[in-house]
Image (cartoon, rainbow, N blue to C red):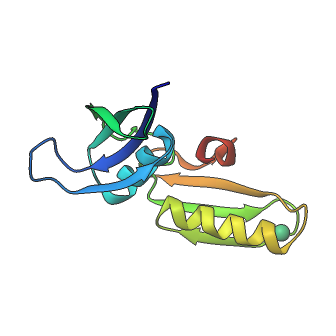
Amino acid sequence: MAYKETFWMACDSIEQLRAEYGPFHTRLEAEREARNLGFGFLLRYEHLVGDQDDIQEVRCIFIELPPPATDGIHSALRLHTRCATCGESAVHELSWRAEVWADIHEFEHLRHRVRLFAQTRAEGLKEISDWRDACA
Ligand SMILES: [Zn+2]
């Protein structure tokens, strides 16, 4: 029986000559990578795969990403990570660096929980709650 296979790419435009990055299995992953790269589009590929694992049909759909949110993690000037358990903290310019820091800290220190604060011009420091879930 034929089945459908879907994957996602981050891309910088919808022109023929475009930079693409991927593939990703989920839209969230592709979107995060697109944001990191400053790309404005996602490309969703759908392959219809036949009995002999032959691709019978390819469909691709461009999705334009909304502009970065005006508050929260994307517009932050700086991101502060701070461990709620031991108090160790660090400052990051990029959200993925904050994530990596938290991953390493929580890996090296069992049951520690890292909180994230975004520093914005308008609001100063603001905690981003459930950020690990949102980035997962
Ligand atoms: Zn800690």
Vertically, is 111 above or below 50?
below
Residue lying at the far left of the rendered structure: 16
- Whole-percent x and y of residue 132? 67, 49
- 80 or 51, which is in the foreground? 51
Where residue 51 sits, quadrant-wise, is: top left
Q: Position of residue 82 (x, y in %)?
A: 72, 63
Q: Residue at x 36, y 34 (%)?
A: 47
Question: What residue is shown at x 82% (from left), y 58% (from top)?
Answer: 113
Query: In the image, is 49 to the left or to the right of 29?
Result: left
> Which residue is drawn at the image coordinates 38% and 55% (left, top)?
22
Residue 44: percent from left, percent from top: 34, 36
Count all numbered tags in the image, as a single digit. 0
- Ligand 1 position by quadrant: bottom right
* In the foreground, 50 or 13: 50
Q: Is residue 125 visible?
A: yes
Q: In the rendered view, would you say 42 is above or below 119?
A: above
Question: As drawn, which residue projects farthest toward the top?
Answer: 1
Q: Quadrant of residue 103?
A: bottom right
How far across and how far down the image is residue 100, in percent?
A: 62, 67
Q: Which image quarter: residue 36?
A: bottom left
Q: Is residue 124 left or right of residue 22?
A: right
| Residue 128 in sight | no
Comparing 39 with 20, the one in front is 20
Towards the viewer: 78 or 62: 62
> Is 32 placed left or right of 110 in the picture?
left
